[in-house]
Image: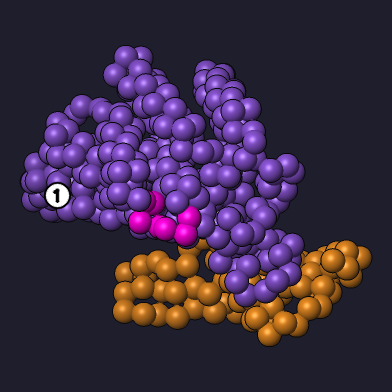
């Protein structure tokens, strides 16, 4: 196992909580229009294919833009982009809660932005890990809510296959995923995904020894490498989209959506179990495998 | 939304908060900060949190006045201009 049992459990619990928050947020927008003009002006049912192609083009443009901005070290634009995405995603999630309090939707979506603003700013300015991870629980549901209306089960499967292939290529073949994550954490000081730094037994022993060695001197600063468990934002958002699409396809039966969450958790759990220290793995193929299994079971039973 | 009243309220709220609060992070203004000690921790209820809470209470009670909303949002935004706006719970310095 790559990480300690405790850290692995924390990541899995955060993943599960986000999936269920995601299901709530996505389900809410089945009957309500998305705020900030993110809704669709025409019924999507007849136009899944163009919508899917649009998603692919958007992904290609986004990934290329990230590469370019990273290459030219345009930190300001990357941070600004990150800030805007977090602000809107949080706004969408908070709106789904606030819409329950008042029917003044425009006002409520504006208030939701006020809730989102300090969190989005703190993500860019501070490096507090607790607030970072807590806010992540609400960001991905907001993003997923935008994509669920324009996908059906067929295009969802296609999307998951393509994303899994891209993930494998980016982690195992080209290594750009690791480079991007490193750049985000070291240079941009922001990271999109769950991030839990921790100390292994050896690292703790090393600190103990250093403390004993330097117990008489007051000002000793020494850099020590710590381990970190990370789970990229994409690995969290795609399962939410999957469970949301299944919720839409089998509505009002929500069991298939729950099965998708279970499948994704099992896939991710399996990856954590077989992963080895100091090696990097693409999570999407494992998560997608679990999701496909859940989709298959759902169609067999329901 | 009643935009002119909202904007006037916003500007007044921002100026009001600017004049009454500390000029820099950690500096004391005319109105003191709302801080509590809890065990080894300090809890700082920033004025952006207070104005947001009041705003939510007003909406919950269906009180719709965009001038008042503007004032509260002006105070809220001014509160976010401090470098330590996100430090709500922190350890007491020994």
Q: Is residue A217 left or right of residue A136?
A: left
Q: Position of residue B62 (x, y in %)?
A: 72, 82
The relative height of residue B45 versus residue A259 in the rendered view (above or below) is below
Q: Is residue B12 magenta?
A: no
Q: Position of residue A227 (x, y in %)?
A: 22, 40
The residue under the point 84% across, 66% down is B1
Residue A300 visible here: yes
- Say which of A7 and A243 sits in front: A243
For the N terminus of chain A, the quadrant is top left
Q: Residue furthest right?
A: B4
Q: Subunit of mark 1? A: A
Q: Residue furthest top?
A: A173
The residue under the point 36% across, 14% down is A174
> Looking at the rendering, which quadrant does residue A296 occupy?
top left
Chain B: colour as depicted: orange
Q: Is residue A264 left or right of residue A31?
A: left
Chain A: colour as depicted: purple
Q: Position of residue A155 (x, y in %)?
A: 49, 31
- Which residues are the magenta region? A251-257
Q: Which residue is mark 1?
A: A5
The colour scheme is by chain
- Say which of A14 and B74 sits in front: A14
The residue under the point 28% across, 39% down is A293
Secondary structure found at label 1: helix
Q: Is residue A295 left or right of residue A53?
A: left
- Within-10-Å neighbours for mark 1: few <14, some 14–19, many 20+: few
């Amino acid at each position: 196992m790559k990480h300690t049992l405790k850290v692995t459990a924390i990541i899995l619990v955060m993943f599960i909580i986000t999936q269920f928050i995601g299901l709530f947020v996505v389900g809410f927008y089945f009957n309500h229009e998305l705020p900030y003009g993110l809704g669709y002006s025409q019924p999507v049912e007849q136009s899944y294919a163009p919508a899917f192609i649009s998603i692919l083009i958007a992904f290609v443009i986004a990934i290329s833009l990230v590469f370019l901005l990273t290459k030219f070290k345009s930190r300001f634009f990357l941070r600004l982009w990150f800030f805007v995405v977090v602000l809107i995603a949080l706004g969408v999630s908070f709106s789904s809660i606030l819409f329950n309090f008042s029917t003044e939707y425009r006002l409520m979506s504006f208030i939701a932005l006020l809730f989102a603003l300090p969190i989005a700013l703190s993500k860019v300015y501070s490096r507090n890990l607790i607030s970072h991870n807590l806010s992540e629980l609400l960001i991905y549901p907001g993003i997923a809510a935008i994509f669920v209306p324009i996908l059906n089960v067929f295009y969802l499967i296609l999307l998951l296959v393509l994303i899994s292939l891209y993930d494998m290529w980016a982690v195992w073949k080209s290594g750009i995923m690791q480079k991007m994550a490193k750049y985000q954490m070291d240079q941009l000081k922001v990271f999109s995904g769950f991030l839990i730094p921790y100390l292994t037994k050896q690292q703790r022993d090393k600190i103990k020894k250093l403390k004993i060695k330097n117990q008489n001197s007051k000002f000793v600063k020494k850099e020590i490498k710590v381990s970190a468990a990370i789970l990229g934002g994409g690995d969290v958002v795609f399962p939410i989209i999957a469970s949301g699409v299944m919720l839409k396809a089998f509505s009002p039966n929500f069991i298939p959506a729950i099965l998708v969450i279970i499948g994704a958790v099992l896939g991710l759990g399996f990856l954590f179990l077989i992963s080895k220290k100091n090696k990097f793995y693409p999570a999407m193929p494992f998560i997608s495998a679990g999701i496909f299994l859940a989709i298959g079971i759902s169609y067999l039973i329901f | 939304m009643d935009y002119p009243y909202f904007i006037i309220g916003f500007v007044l709220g921002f100026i009001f908060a600017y004049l009454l609060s500390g000029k820099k992070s950690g500096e004391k203004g005319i109105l003191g900060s709302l801080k509590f000690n809890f065990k080894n921790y300090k809890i700082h209820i920033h004025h952006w949190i207070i104005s947001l809470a009041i705003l939510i209470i007003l909406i919950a009670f269906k009180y719709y006045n965009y001038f008042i909303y503007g004032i509260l949002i002006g105070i809220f935004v001014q509160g976010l201009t401090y470098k330590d706006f996100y430090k709500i719970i922190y350890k007491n310095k020994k």
